[in-house]
Image (cartoon, rainbow, N blue to C red):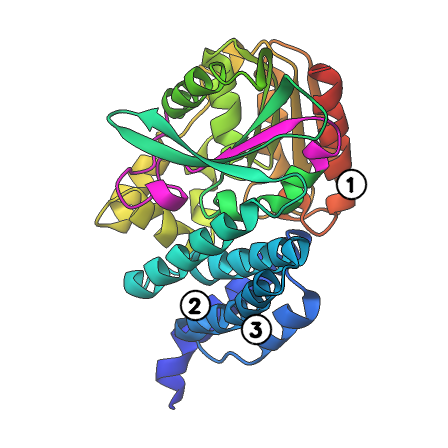
Amino acid sequence: MNETTTRPGDARLRSAVAHWAPRFVANGVIPSDLAEVTGGLARWEDWCGAWSSQAELHEALGRAALDGGHALSAGEHLTRAGLYYHFAKFVFVNDLAQMRAAHRKAIACRQLALAHLRPPGERVEIPYQARALAGILRRPFGVTRAPLVVMVMGLDSCKEEMDAYEQTFLARGLATLAFDGPGQGEAEYDMPIRGDYEVPVKAVLDWAVQRPEIDPDRIGLWGVSLGGYYAPRAAAFDKRIKACVALSGPYEWGDAWDGLPELTRETFRVRSHLKTAAEAKRHAASLSLKGVASRITCPLMLVAGGLDRLCPASHAERLAAEARGPVELLLVEDGTHVANNRPYRYRPQTADWLAERLA
């Protein structure tokens, strides 16, 4: 294999490992698996297949545990398998056939795991513009009308990645609803990214308040990465949201565009259903809180990483200055994007903050 053919793939591979390795571990990837998979790769083109192969090992353990009557172990193995399949596909937009195949496996493994989790989960489908948004609802043990945290995904995350985050909320008596919105997860193939994310959030809340297990007066919103833009945006328009957490979200996505990794820009283009990079850059500029942030009146907690190169802390600082409700800004000075290298510095803190606001 000559240098010319390997260099482009190597650059993307180096970028993926450099930017996302802390996130993988923080969200449930076993460090030795991460080292073995990425250490054995020479080209980005082999990424999806390598992670899918590792996922198959955990899937097999999960299915064997089910056959042996070990339901709890099965749930754990299958959840990890779903996570690995997700990371196989998360920004692998250069080969859509491989990406879709891995995505189908991620959905299937997490779905099979749900009944065996503690607490269990339920797949839900939320009516949205003559279609449906897929979600996972989990409710804490011993709570009849639970407060709810609606979890908003980012550009390359989806509901199958959320188990580690869900656990922090469930342990504090909060129900969780992680859903795939336009441009995300199960919706990414038919619904392009849209900046006015208050529209899908409204549909989700309309559905959630009808559930008898949920207290309609205690609903919070949580968003990660690009979801850290979507969540405050929705909070500005829907007053049913009583508190909002935004993790490393942009104030204006267009301002961050030129500093984004190539894989991120290309993923945005594909999930916006656009043909060219120029079109994607113009669309990115439409994702903005300018003129909107001042409408946010609910309590708002912002988390920013001081070393975040994808979405610098200045975005959170600008949002904090313009929001009109109570604002807390947690700056993790040595944190990278979403402070995934320091999850203990913000995950329990944001869960405690939401639990207090929705008490």
Q: Which residue is mark 2?
A: 48
Q: Residue at x 35, y 53 (%)?
A: 266
Cα distance in 3D space between marks 3 and 1 = 27 Å
| Label 3 environment density (alpha carbons within 10 Å; few <14, some 14–19, many ≥20) | many
Magenta stretch, residue numbers:
168-196
Task: Name the residue nearer the viewer: 182 or 284.
Answer: 182
Q: For this rendering, which residue is in front, 212 or 223?
A: 212
Which one is earlier in the sequence, the residue at label 3 or at label 1?
Answer: 3
On the image, which quarter does residue 167 sit in? top right
- Label 3, on which residue? 38
Is residue 307 in the magenta section? no
Majority secondary structure of the magenta segment? loop
Q: Amino acid at mark 1?
A: Arg
Q: Is residue 328 left or right of residue 314?
A: right
In 3D space, how far apart are the residues under numbered discs 3 and 2 (Cα atoms)?
Answer: 11 Å
Residue 215 image-quadrant placement? top right
Q: Which residue is mark 1?
A: 345
